[in-house]
Amino acid sequence: MLRFIRKMLIWLLLLFAVAAFGYFVVLPKVLPTNYREQVEKYAKMYDVEESLIFAVIFCESRFDPDAHSRAGAKGLMQVTTETGWWVADSLDYLDAETIDLKDPETSIAVGTWYLKWLEDKFGEVQPTVLAAYNAGPGKVSQWLADKQYSEDGYHLEEIPFPETNSYVKKVELVQKLYEICYGL
């Protein structure tokens, strides 16, 4: 009996060690929380969920502040220069002429403000907000006005751009992972 208890304790310790290694070593590499201080700051400032900000950063740039897209989007949250200028004009603490979207603090500030603006514009219907973040608010407004894509003008039943449809699903999945793994 003592031998059985000893084996069980060894297995439990081994299991605990593997779980701790996974949580403290593997998880941060697979699902990073880099720039946590900035994410917390702007999540609180603009009332946007931290898990959503982390998910957008993960899906947009994989936490690479130097990331850029074919469409000209830059930085962690992949904001275009034009959107960055527009947001900077709306904020007292940013200057449109000197804005640097590759700066993590600026990218998170601008991207989070823009997510909040999209929430205010489209309501807190997250798939619609994410579709607008990816395809643009003008395009999403067109889809919402089209009965083929939205019966009520508020929810998108179908997203006609496969890339945008895939993006929305990916961000929502990654957001769930952040919520589950980090309790955000």
Image: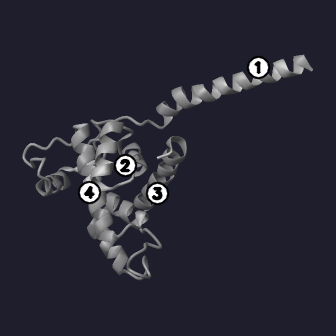
Q: How far apart are labels 4 and 1 at the CA level?
A: 51 Å
**Do labels 2 and 1 touch, CB within 8 Å?**
no
Q: Nearer the viewer, mark 2 or mark 3?
A: 2
- Which three-letter amino acid code belongs to the residue tagged 2? Ile
- Which three-letter amino acid code belongs to the residue tagged 1? Ile
Q: Earlier in the sequence, mark 2 or mark 1?
A: 1
Instruction: Give the residue pinned by disc 2.
Output: 53
Q: Note whether 87 is above or below 138 in the view shown.
A: above
Which label sits on residue 10? 1
Q: Earlier in the sequence, mark 2 or mark 3?
A: 2
Instruction: Give the residue pinned by disc 4.
Output: 114
Q: Residue at x 13, y 47 (%)?
A: 94
Instruction: Give the residue pinned by disc 3.
Output: 166
Which label sits on residue 177? none
Total number of numbered labels?
A: 4
**Do labels 4 and 3 touch, CB within 8 Å?**
no
Q: Earlier in the sequence, mark 1 or mark 3?
A: 1
> Is residue 74 shown to the viewer in this render?
no
Q: Residue at x 26, y 38 (%)?
A: 104
**Do labels 2 and 4 touch, CB within 8 Å?**
no
Residue 177 in picture, x, y percent from top left: 52, 46
User: In the image, 120: left or right of 161?
Assistant: left
User: In the image, 178: left or right of 94?
Assistant: right
The kind of secondary structure element at disc 3 is: helix
**Do labels 4 and 1 touch, CB within 8 Å?**
no
